[in-house]
Image: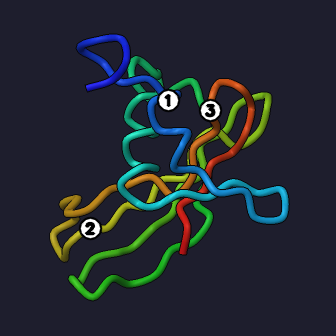
Amino acid sequence: MGSRGKYDTTADFLTNIENRNGKFYTDKATIDKIGQVEARGEDFSLLNKRIMSSRASTEGGTSVVYKYSDELGTKYLIHEVTDARGYIIHRDFDAVRISSGQLINKGH
């Protein structure tokens, strides 16, 4: 639980961020938490959605990375995997722009 009680804030996770050559990275668990905080209440239908990459998944469906952006640029990169029937079996954040403007990426 975060500093404000019931809900976490992005600030609760900033200690896990690493600056590499001016780009910011964190682990999968942290980027997913930051994404959940930043996306809370977001109307994704108001964002521009673009496919950044798409390939067949080992589950028989597809593995797609979507870029959601607004007038300030990339807001979210979301990785989504479907099975052979088209059902989403995995979805997580690959990058999230936080309210202060930095794009936080999932480290590899």
> Disc count in the image?
3
From the top left corner, tell me how far across and down residue 92 is, in percent.
Answer: 37, 55
Image quarter in which the C terminus is found: bottom right
Amino acid found under the numbered disc labelled 3: Ile
For mark 2, what is the residue?
82
Q: Tell me the amino acid under the disc marked 2.
A: Thr
Question: Does the residue at mark 3 contact the one at mark 2 (Cβ under 8 Å)?
Answer: no
Residue 91 placement, left or right of 26:
left
- Nearer the N terminus, badge 3 or badge 1? 1
Which residue lies at the image location 37% right of the left edge and 17% below the top edge?
3
Instruction: Looking at this view, name the residue that lies furthest to the right.
Output: 21
Q: In this view, does 60 lie above or below 78?
A: below
| Residue position marked by numbered label 3 in the rendering | 98
Q: Quadrant of the N terminus?
A: top left
Question: Which numbered disc flags the more N-terminal residue, 3 or 2?
Answer: 2
Way the structure is coloured: rainbow
Q: Do the residues labelled 3 and 1 touch (CB within 8 Å)?
A: yes
Q: Label 1, label 2: how many angstroms apart (C-alpha)?
A: 29 Å
Query: Image quadrant of residue 2?
Result: top left
Q: Residue drawn at (19%, 76%), measured in percent from left and top?
A: 84
Earlier sequence position, callout 1 versus callout 2: 1
Which residue bears the numbered disc 1? 10
Q: How crowded is mark 2: few (under 14 residues within 10 Å), some or many (20 or more)?
A: many
Residue occupying the point 46% across, 22% down? 42
Q: Could you tell me which secondary element the residue under label 1 belongs to?
A: helix
**SS label for mark 2:** strand
Determine which of the numbered discs, if any, sits on residue 41 in the image. Answer: none
**Residue 50: x percent and y percent?**
62, 52
Amino acid under label 1? Answer: Thr
Q: Are marks 1 and 2 in contact (CB under 8 Å)?
A: no
Residue 69 placement (x, y as % from top left)? 67, 38
